[in-house]
Image (cartoon, rainbow, N blue to C red):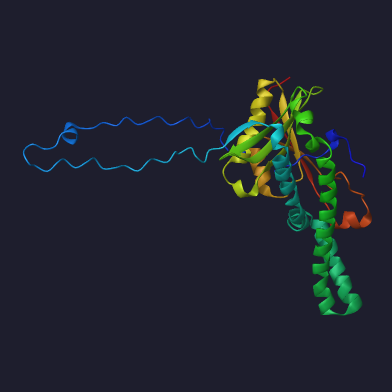
């Protein structure tokens, strides 16, 4: 299958306070009183030992820290990316329909025509199930093509694509020794911008601010390398993703209707049952 060049591959979307690593605990000094060292001479009962206090839990044990990608983490990073993109299939097929009033109108017209032609309430009621099934089928087909293309371009060799070129980097979020989130930055020297790409968080660790911490790491990278702005593009349907970008300071600068993902054939049936919007965001760090 023909794939687009890595620069044309659409990034994933989908960030936790950046914390310091947990320092080693210090040994507690044990103080023993004289009454405990020597028995009571007057027959009086010995002083009771001091109450034992339960060890305090480290308040930072759930903290996430962000560090650069290591080649040994290639497979777990690809898994997080794959699972994050696969979640787009039902979201695009079903939730995305809410953002497509013309498609809703078309499906309504088809339902009316079905009833007029067949005079059957049963067939008319079954039509929406058929339409949703077709939306799921084409969403899965297109997104699997997109995944195949991404996994054979930049995500096939993260070290080579992101860690070696100047102006690019790839980070992982680590919690309890496990990689739970990813994000990449790809610099563009022509317009002095850096692109935020491939952001994804393991579904079992969401709601902990990991995505925000990853996003801030990219912003920090852009400022340290004197880039003028950070840009990103997303086809995410969930509003939570868009609110995340806005919370980081990004401004919505445009949307492309009926965006063509890599692997799309643009056939009539595909256009009828698969539509996606491509939103562009920009954060200006300094004026040129």
Compare residues 106 and 147 and report the one nearer the observer: 147
Q: Answer whether residue 206 is visible to the viewer in this image.
A: no
- Which of the 4 image quarters holds residue 51? top left
Which quadrant of the figure contains the C terminus? top right
Q: Answer whether residue 102 is visible to the viewer in this image.
A: yes
Q: Where's residue 134, x and y in %?
A: 84, 62
Q: Can you name the residue that lies furthest to the left here?
A: 42
Which quadrant of the figure contains the N terminus? top right
Q: Residue at x 85, y 80 (%)?
A: 120
In the displayed structure, 133 sits above or below 78; it is below
Q: Where's residue 229, x and y in %?
A: 72, 27
- Which of the 4 image quarters holds residue 233? top right
In the displayed structure, 283 sits above or below 148; it is above
Q: Residue at x 24, y 40 (%)?
A: 50
- Image side of residue 25 versus residue 38, left or right: right
- Image side of residue 7 versus residue 199, left or right: right
Q: Where's residue 257, x and y in %?
A: 83, 46
């Amino acid at each position: 299958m023909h794939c687009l060049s890595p620069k044309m591959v659409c990034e994933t979307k989908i960030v936790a306070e950046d914390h310091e690593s947990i320092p080693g605990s210090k040994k507690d000094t044990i103080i023993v009183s004289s009454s405990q060292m020597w028995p009571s001479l007057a027959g009086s009962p010995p002083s009771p030992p001091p109450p034992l206090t339960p060890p305090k839990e480290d308040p930072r044990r759930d903290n996430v820290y962000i560090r650069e990608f290591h080649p040994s983490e290639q497979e777990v990073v690809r898994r997080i990316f794959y699972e994050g993109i696969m979640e787009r299939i039902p979201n695009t097929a079903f939730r995305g329909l809410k953002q497509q009033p013309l498609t809703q109108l078309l499906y309504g017209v088809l339902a009316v025509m079905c009833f007029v032609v067949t005079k059957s309430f049963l067939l008319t009621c079954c039509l929406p199930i058929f339409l949703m099934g077709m939306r799921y089928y084409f969403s899965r087909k297109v997104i699997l093509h997109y995944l195949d293309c991404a996994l054979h371009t930049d995500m096939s060799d993260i070290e080579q694509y992101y860690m070696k070129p100047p102006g690019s980097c790839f980070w992982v979020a680590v919690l309890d020794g496990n990689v739970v989130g990813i994000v990449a930055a790809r610099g563009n020297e022509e317009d002095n911008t850096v692109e935020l790409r491939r952001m994804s968080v393991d579904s079992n660790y969401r709601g902990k601010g990991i995505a925000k911490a990853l996003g801030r790491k990219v912003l920090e990278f852009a400022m340290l390398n004197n880039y003028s702005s950070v840009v990103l593009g997303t086809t995410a349907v969930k509003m939570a993703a868009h609110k995340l970008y806005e919370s980081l300071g990004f401004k919505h600068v445009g949307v492309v209707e009926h965006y063509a993902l890599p692997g799309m054939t643009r056939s009539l049936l595909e256009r009828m049952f698969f539509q996606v919007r491509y939103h562009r965001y920009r954060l200006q760090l300094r004026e040129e």
